[in-house]
Image (cartoon, rainbow, N blue to C red):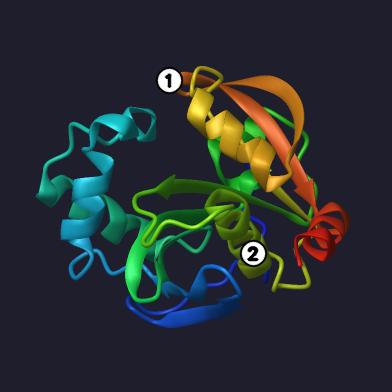
């Protein structure tokens, strides 16, 4: 791993609103920098839910979870966000520089790569195409930095739900990669492909 500093990642103080989108189906979407204190109830409920086993934090106490995200908040290469739909929290998102993460040892990183992890915690009012549209919003947030050329993701190869969401988001599969505690399915979404998919989404 290296320590190359870039302007690829959006960051801000805890609780800061850093991105908004008005989706014709989802409504108002806001991306807010995770506040390890104010958002602790929400994220602890999500990461300890039965369906979040692959997130890997189910055994963490509230204090341990708070300390973990406070640590992440201090890293220049990793950031965490809470995505809200019409003010309701729906997604926990993490962005990171792959070359400053264990993933960087598993594939050949490119200067415009940004890695993401996301946990779908809620949906809000039922709508058709929720997953595809929230994926579009996540991508629009990451690609809002012109330095970003490609989004990289590596869900566990056994996490069928995450793999299905990755396909709906438009990612193209790469190879399997060996990572700490799991085998990941490497997948990529280029800016060009995202722009093409966005035009079709409408």
The number of discs equals: 2
Q: Position of residue 41 (x, y in %)?
A: 16, 58
Work out how far the residue at label 2 is from the one at label 1, CA to CA, in angstroms.
Answer: 26 Å
Residue located 55% across and 58% down the image: 134
Q: Which residue is mark 2?
A: 142
The image quadrant that residue 140 belongs to is bottom right
State the SS at label 1: loop
Task: Please state if 155 lies on the left or on the right of 167 as rendered.
Answer: left
The image quadrant that residue 8 belongs to is bottom right
State the SS at label 2: helix
Q: Position of residue 113 (x, y in %)?
A: 73, 52
Q: Report the quarter where the C terminus lies.
A: bottom right
Q: Report the quarter where the N terminus lies.
A: top right
Task: Please state if 100 lies on the left or on the right of 190 as rendered.
Answer: left
In front: 63, or 32?
Answer: 32
Residue located 75% across and 60% down the image: 201
Q: Residues within 10 Å of mark 2 (few under 14, many from 20)?
A: many
Task: Please state if 156 lies on the left or on the right of 124 as rendered.
Answer: right
Task: Please state if 46 lies on the left or on the right of 132 as rendered.
Answer: left
Of the residues under marks 2 and 1, which one precedes in the sequence?
2
Residue located 54% across and 78% down the image: 19
Q: Residue 14 shows which numbered tag?
A: none
Q: Position of residue 45 (x, y in %)?
A: 19, 48
Vertical side of 183 occupied by 70: above or below = below
The image quadrant that residue 82 belongs to is bottom left
Vertical side of 153 occupied by 159: above or below = above
Q: Position of residue 144 (x, y in %)?
A: 69, 73
* Disc number lying in front (2 or 1): 2
Q: Residues within 10 Å of mark 1 (few under 14, many from 20)?
A: few
Residue located 50% across and 80% down the image: 18
Q: Which residue is mark 1?
A: 181
Vertical side of 158 occupied by 4: above or below = below
């Amino acid at each position: 791993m290296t320590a190359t500093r870039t302007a690829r990642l959006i960051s801000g103080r805890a609780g800061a609103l850093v991105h908004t989108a008005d989706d014709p189906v989802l409504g108002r979407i806001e991306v807010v920098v995770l506040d390890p204190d104010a958002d602790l109830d929400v994220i602890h409920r999500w990461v300890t839910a039965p369906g979040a086993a692959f997130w890997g934090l189910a055994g963490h106490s509230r204090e341990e979870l708070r300390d973990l995200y406070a640590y992440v908040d201090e890293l220049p290469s990793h950031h965490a966000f809470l995505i809200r739909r019409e003010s309701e929290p729906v997604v926990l998102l993490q962005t990171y520089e792959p070359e400053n993460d264990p993933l960087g040892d598993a594939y050949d990183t490119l200067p415009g790569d940004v890695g993401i992890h996301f946990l779908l915690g809620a949906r809000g009012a039922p709508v058709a195409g929720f997953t595809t549209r929230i994926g579009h919003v996540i991508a629009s947030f990451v690609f809002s930095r012109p330095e970003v050329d490609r989004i990289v993701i590596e869900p566990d190869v056994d996490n069928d739900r995450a793999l299905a969401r990755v396909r709906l988001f438009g990612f193209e599969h790469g190879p399997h990669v060996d990572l700490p505690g799991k085998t990941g399915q490497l997948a990529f979404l280029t800016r060009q492909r995202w722009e093409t998919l966005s035009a079709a989404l409408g």
